[in-house]
C-alpha cells in the first residue's frame, strides 16, 4: 500500500506560468514533508520542505503548501523556467529519532515549454 | 556535487557475478542509506545504517548484502542477482535531528 502518492506522472507548463505539483499521503504519523528534484543521470537533490506544524513554506520561486486535514501537499513554482524541467519527488518522514526513513511518491515529470 | 559520491556510475553484471557498489559521504553525517529506484516505481528504502549499525532491513533479499565499515563509507555487495534487480541504486546520508537526506548520483545496474 503506497503511503505517498503523486497521481500525475507528468505535467507540461508554459515558461513563465505557474507549475503546481500535487502529492497525497495516508500516514498520519508523517510530520515532515520534502520535495526533491531529479535530473536524468543524477541523484535527487533537496528542494524545499515543510513541517507539519506549518501550512506554507516559501523559498524564492518555490512554495510548498500543506493541508493536513486533507493529507495533501503541493509545490508551486512561479514563474516556471526551462531549467525547472525535471522529475519531482514528494517525500514524507515520521518524527525523527535518529536515522530517518523517507517515503517517496512515484514522481512527476515536469516539462517547461519555451 | 552533494558530498555523497557513488562508484561505479554504471555496472553491467551477469547473474553469476559478484560485484560491490561503493558510497562515500564527506558531510560528517552519522546515518547512511541504500535506496532502489526501479522503472516507474517510487524510491524504495533498502537499508539504514545509524552510527555504522544496521537499523533497518526493508525485507531485502539476501543476495544484497550491505556493509558499513565506518560512518563515511557504505557498500552494497551483490551476488547471484536476477534481471529484475536491474535498477538505479542510490546512496544517501543524513544527520541526526535533521530532516531530509543528501543523495549520491546513483549506480545504474543492469543484470544480464
Image: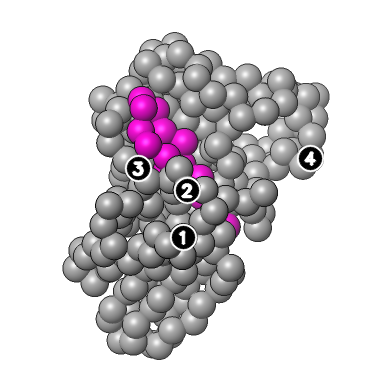
Task: Please tell me whether mark 4 or mark 2 is closer to you in this view.
Answer: 2
Mark yes or no: residue B104 visible.
no
Badge 4 vs badge 2, beta-carbon distance below 8 Å: no
Task: Write down the residue under mark 3.
Answer: B100
Disc 3 versus disc 4: distance between alpha carbons? 31 Å
Mark 3 or mark 4, earlier in chain: 4
Badge 3 vs badge 2, beta-carbon distance below 8 Å: no
- Residue furthest to the left in view is A60
For mark 1, name the chain: A
Q: Quadrant of residue A30?
A: top left
Task: Write down the residue under mark 1.
Answer: A71
Q: Is residue B28 left or right of residue B104?
A: left
Which residue is pictured at 46% across the width and 65% down the height?
Answer: A70
Q: Compared to B66, does A30 lie above or below? A: below
| Percent coordinates x, y for residue A89 in the rendering | 47, 57
Disc 1 versus disc 3: distance between alpha carbons? 19 Å
Task: Write down the residue under mark 4.
Answer: B83
Task: Please tell me whether mark 1 or mark 3 is closer to you in this view.
Answer: 1
Disc 3 versus disc 2: distance between alpha carbons? 18 Å
Disc 4 versus disc 1: distance between alpha carbons? 37 Å
| Magenta stretch, residue numbers | A93-106
Marks 3 & 2 on one chain: no
Badge 4 vs badge 1, beta-carbon distance below 8 Å: no
Amino acid at each position: 500500500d503506497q503511503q505517498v502518492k503523486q497521481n500525475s506522472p507528468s505535467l507540461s507548463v508554459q515558461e513563465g506560468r505557474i507549475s503546481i505539483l500535487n502529492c497525497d499521503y495516508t500516514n498520519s504519523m508523517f510530520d515532515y514533508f520534502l520535495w526533491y528534484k531529479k535530473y536524468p543521470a543524477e541523484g535527487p537533490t533537496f528542494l524545499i520542505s515543510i513541517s507539519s506544524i506549518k501550512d506554507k513554506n516559501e523559498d524564492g520561486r518555490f512554495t510548498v503548501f500543506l493541508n493536513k486535514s486533507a493529507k495533501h501537499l503541493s509545490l508551486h513554482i512561479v514563474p516556471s523556467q526551462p531549467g525547472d524541467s525535471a522529475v519531482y519527488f514528494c517525500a514524507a518522514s515520521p518524527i525523527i529519532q535518529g536515522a530517518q526513513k523517507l517515503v517517496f511518491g512515484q514522481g512527476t515529470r515536469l516539462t517547461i515549454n519555451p | 556535487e552533494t558530498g555523497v559520491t557513488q562508484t561505479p556510475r554504471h555496472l553491467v553484471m551477469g547473474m553469476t557475478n559478484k560485484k560491490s557498489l561503493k558510497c562515500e559521504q564527506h558531510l560528517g553525517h552519522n546515518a547512511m542509506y541504500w535506496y532502489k529506484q526501479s522503472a516507474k516505481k517510487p524510491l524504495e528504502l533498502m537499508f539504514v545504517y545509524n552510527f555504522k549499525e544496521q537499523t533497518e532491513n526493508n525485507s531485502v533479499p539476501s543476495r544484497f548484502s550491505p556493509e558499513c565499515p565506518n560512518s563515511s563509507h557504505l557498500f552494497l555487495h551483490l551476488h547471484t542477482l536476477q534481471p529484475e534487480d536491474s535498477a538505479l541504486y542510490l546512496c544517501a546520508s543524513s544527520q541526526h535531528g535533521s530532516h531530509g537526506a543528501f543523495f549520491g548520483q546513483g549506480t545504474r545496474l543492469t543484470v544480464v
